[in-house]
Amino acid sequence: MTLKESLSARALAAPQSGIVELVNYARGRQGLIPLWAGEGDLPSPDFINRATKDALDAGETFYTWQRGLPELRQALSRYYQRHFGVERPFEHFFATSSGMHAINLCVQAVASPGDEIVYLTPSWPNIVAAVGISGANPVPVEVDYVNGGWSLDVTKIEKAITPRTRALFINTPSNPTGWTATQDDLQAILALARKHGLWIIADEIYALYYYHGARAPSFMDIQAPEDRILYANSFSKNWSMTGWRVGWIVAPPEIGQVLENLIQYSSSGLTPFMQRGAIAALEQGDEFVRSNIERARTSRDILCDALIATNRVQTRKPDGALYAFLKIDGIDDPRAAAFDIVDKTLVGLAPGTAFGPGGGAFLRACFLRDPKQITEAAGRLAEYIAKL
Ligand SMILES: Cc1ncc(COP(=O)(O)O)c(C=O)c1O
């Protein structure tokens, strides 16, 4: 038995990220415009960095509260009051070491090995992998691609539910499609969860990246106190903090001790000096978030208008999130095409094959960048497409 063969089946089954594969291939090339990862080009703002530097200077370098600093949890409570109009006392909030960590903990909290978690696809691959590594089985339900847009037939979710189903994982607005659940979709999904006694894991990390109003419809709008909903969220996208690896969970306080234990045995708490930066983001960052989202909207329009004008790209402007998910006439193998496109145009796209069932025909472009750079990228892509 080789060293590798002696590893656990679950570890061996975890797939290489189809996005990172491409990033590793072309990272750092001169003139590259990287639209492959889900992050923007702006560094974290000064007021956030300063709060963290001050905390380091003040010696905040010790073990800390497993659920997060009380001040951070209070700041999260106020954030939900401002943006979602809901009263959630600080006991509902748990600081985590990234959104990815939050997802892992939510999955571990509700599913045992052999259980099933239903999720919507095309999907950010890390969601599916997190379920698989936990020992649970991810069960896909495809969101339908209709006339360049995406729509969910909720009856498909009910058909996917079995006696082993423990949770519905709902990411809205969606990475990679931009599909955004309507209030009716959310009501129908919640009704299913209530009927079958299921948890909902709501990944609403892109809730504020919504292009038809202040924020996307949320389970927060319709949740009753007894509903079983866990929210996995992150500081990454709103405040340009992807490299920080800080996130949070919103959960019923009754399960607080269980979540605290899962935090204890996975990270033993979020770094205290980074929590100070996170508090600054929440307390002083609304204007930064607003301008970040406006910039995303401008760049979304530039990219989508230019590509739609080629008449060879089937896409509608996404309702939410940061991505254009593109079906390009003449491209049958998006993985090979992503390598070819980066070689010939120096624009980095993520192949749809990385996003599971329903995604294989597409390429994903993240548009959270300087509109000038997006104009340049759109021009290079349009030229490439014209030659297909
Ligand atoms: C849908 C979704 N959920 C969660 C995350 C996690 O974000 P992070 O681990 O950077 O906090 C991402 C990041 O791309 C995402 O797209």
Image (spheres, grey):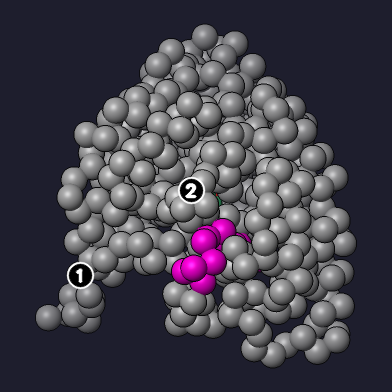
Please tell me which residue lies in front, 384 or 274.
274
The residue tagged 1 is: 9
Horizontal side of residue 292 vs 225, given as left or right? right
Residue 296 position, x and y percent, is 71, 34
Q: Residue at x 58, y 34 (%)?
A: 217
Horizontal side of residue 37 vs 113, given as left or right? right
Task: Find out whether residue 232 is within the magenta segment.
Answer: no
The residue tagged 2 is: 202
Please tell me which residue lies in front, 172 or 26.
172
The single residue placed furthest to the left in the displayed view is 1
Please tell me which residue lies in front, 254 or 357.
254
Horizontal side of residue 9 vs 311, given as left or right? left
Q: Which residues are magenta?
A: 244-256
Q: Is residue 346 in view from this perspective?
A: no
**Contact, mark 1 vs mark 2 (Cβ under 8 Å):** no
Q: Amino acid at mark 1?
A: Ala
Q: Amino acid at mark 2?
A: Ala
Quadrant containing the C terminus in the rendered view: top left
Packing grade of label 1 (10 A; few <14, some 14-19, many >=20) is few
Q: CA distance from mark 1 to mark 2?
A: 28 Å
Packing grade of label 2 (10 A; few <14, some 14-19, many >=20) is many
Q: Residue at x 53, y 23 (%)?
A: 384
Residue 343 position, x and y percent, is 51, 39
Q: Residue at x 85, y 45 (%)?
A: 287
Q: Residue at x 64, y 16 (%)?
A: 305
Residue 58's place in the image compared with 149, above or below, is: below
Quadrant assignment, res 96: bottom right
Residue 138 position, x and y percent, is 28, 51
Q: Identify the element where label 1 is drawn.
A: helix
User: Which is in the foreground here, disc 1 or disc 2?
Assistant: 2
Horizontal side of residue 214 vs 250, given as left or right? right
Q: Identify the element where label 2 is drawn.
A: strand
